[in-house]
């Protein structure tokens, strides 16, 4: 009798854990919160991330061991950056610009507000192996004095996709894409990539 009760409890807990988990919707643009409009020249999209249910966290406590970075600016705590450079490797004979995609995810439990004095949100730099700056994204773009605010709700992310010229790169070497927010120097990420002829 006790064995049957234990088996029933395990089956019930597993079923509840499956019901408690939320599905991740297909990536699609969702409107900004009506209270604060997002004014930016850079295209952004917002999607909701998957959250684990209570039972799932009990049965798999170590399955998500991602540690949130601790920034000097306490208002930014909970944000995680992800950087993708495409195509990989960069074939200089085929492309004149490469795409850089920065994803800022709010893994915290409160909404985070990012205020900007201009319409520039991110800066992209291409660095050589000696960390010398070869190209800056802002050199080829007009920046207007147009303040704006970006709100990132808990469990959502914002994507910034920009193209940067590859004219200063040489084939057969490793370069670094350095991406940061000029207004928030704590939000900074790098990724290395290889060039081909």
Image (cartoon, rainbow, N blue to C red):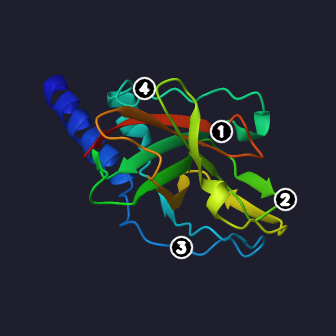
Query: In the drawing, does residue 108 fall left or right of residue 26?
Result: right
Q: Can I make out residue 153 in this image?
A: no
Of tags 2 and 4, the one toward the viewer is 2
Provide the residue designation for mark 3: 30
Provide the residue designation for mark 1: 187
Mark 4 crowdedness (10 Å alpha carbons): few <14, some 14-19, many ≥20: few
**C-alpha distance separating marks 1 and 4:** 21 Å
As displayed, is residue 77 above or below residue 15? above
Query: Which label's residue is closer to the chain start, 1 or 3?
Result: 3
**C-alpha distance separating marks 1 and 3:** 24 Å
Q: Give the quarter of the image for residue 76.
A: top right
The residue at 68%/71% (across/down) is: 33
As displayed, is residue 49 above or below residue 46? above
Provide the residue designation for mark 2: 117
Of tags 1 and 3, the one toward the viewer is 1
Mark 3 crowdedness (10 Å alpha carbons): few <14, some 14-19, many ≥20: few
Of tags 2 and 3, the one toward the viewer is 2
Residue 50's disc is none
């Amino acid at each position: 009798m006790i064995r049957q009760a234990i088996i029933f409890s395990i089956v019930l807990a597993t079923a509840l854990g499956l019901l408690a988990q939320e599905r991740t919707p297909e990536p699609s643009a969702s409107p900004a919160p009506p209270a604060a409009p997002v004014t930016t020249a850079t295209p952004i999209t917002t999607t909701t991330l998957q959250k684990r249910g209570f039972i799932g966290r009990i049965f798999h406590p170590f399955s998500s061991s991602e540690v949130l970075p601790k920034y000097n600016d306490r208002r930014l705590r909970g944000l995680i950056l992800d950087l993708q450079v495409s195509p990989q490797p960069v074939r200089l004979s085929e492309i004149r610009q490469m795409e850089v995609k920065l994803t800022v995810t709010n893994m915290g439990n409160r909404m985070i507000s990012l205020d900007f004095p201009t319409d520039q949100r991110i800066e992209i730099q291409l660095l050589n192996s000696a960390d010398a700056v070869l190209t800056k994204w802002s050199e080829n773009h007009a920046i207007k004095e147009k303040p704006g605010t970006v709100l990132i709700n808990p469990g959502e992310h914002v994507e910034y996709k920009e193209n940067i010229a590859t004219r200063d790169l040489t084939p057969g070497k490793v370069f670094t894409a350095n991406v940061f927010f000029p207004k928030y120097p704590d939000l900074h990420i790098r990724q290395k990539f290889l060039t081909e002829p």
